[in-house]
Amino acid sequence: MEIQIKELKQDRLDEFYGLFSHLLHHDFPGYTPAVQQYLLEKVYTRSAFEYWLDHNLKTIFVASVDTVIVGFAIVDEPYGGVSLCRWLGVTEKQRGKGVGTLLIHKWLEHAKLLGCHKAEVAAQPEAVSFYKKVGLEDEGFRKSSYFGIDQTIFGKVLAQPSDLVMTHY
């Protein structure tokens, strides 16, 4: 089984979006059905992803096995020198096989290439052990944060802050 990590292109948007929708419904238990519906119908619509890709506002890395997308990392464009991984998802069948770890490494490599001094992600309770395992540092707990879920903030310092990078975006 060879895992390939690539940036999502428009020609695979439908496949990605199907997986994103499925995982949001089944693998993010902190979100109520009403919140899941809101996110898919108002914030993370297919047309929003299309716009973000067209305008380079997010980078989406997809993991594929035998040409089938099995995971993703959705990364906001850097702000203030910090790269934020907004979403990370892997199909249940592929968990524990290194897919998530490869996605994290690709995201961190991307952040370094952009000159970011820091990378951050907010994890739901079920994912805390994974983020610790991949070497991110627990930076604190947010109780009842966005959409009412508890989150642990994980981060990694990548470099010294640079005024040029922090003020470029």
Image (cartoon, helix red, strand yellow):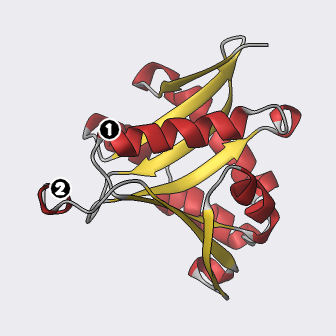
Q: Mark 1 belongs to which amino acid? A: Leu
Secondary structure category for the residue under label 2: loop
Choose the circle earlier in sequence order: 1 or 2: 1
Contact between marks 1 and 2 (CB within 8 A): the answer is: no
Residue 147 position in % (x across, y down)? 61, 78
From the viewer's side, name the closer residue of 75 and 163.
163
Residue 46 visible in the displayed image: no
Tag 2 residue: 169
Closer-to-camera residue (31/112): 112
**Residue 56's quadrant in the figure?**
top left
Image side of residue 57 versus residue 147, left or right: left
Q: Residue 153, relative to residue 4: is it above or below?
A: below
Look at discs 1 and 2 and give the one toward the viewer.
1
Kindly state the secondary structure of the residue where label 1 is placed: helix
Label 1 sits on residue: 113
Residue at left offset 49%, top offset 42%: 107
The total of numbered circles placed on residues is: 2
Q: Residue furthest bottom?
A: 143
Residue 63 image position (x, y, % from top left): 63, 28
Q: Label 2 amino acid?
A: Tyr
Indicate whether 71 appears above or below 31: above
Residue 132 visible, this angle? yes
* Quadrant in which the N terminus is drawn: top right
Cα–Cα span, label 1 and label 2:
14 Å
Q: Could you say where residue 79 lies in the image, as x and y percent from the top left?
A: 28, 62
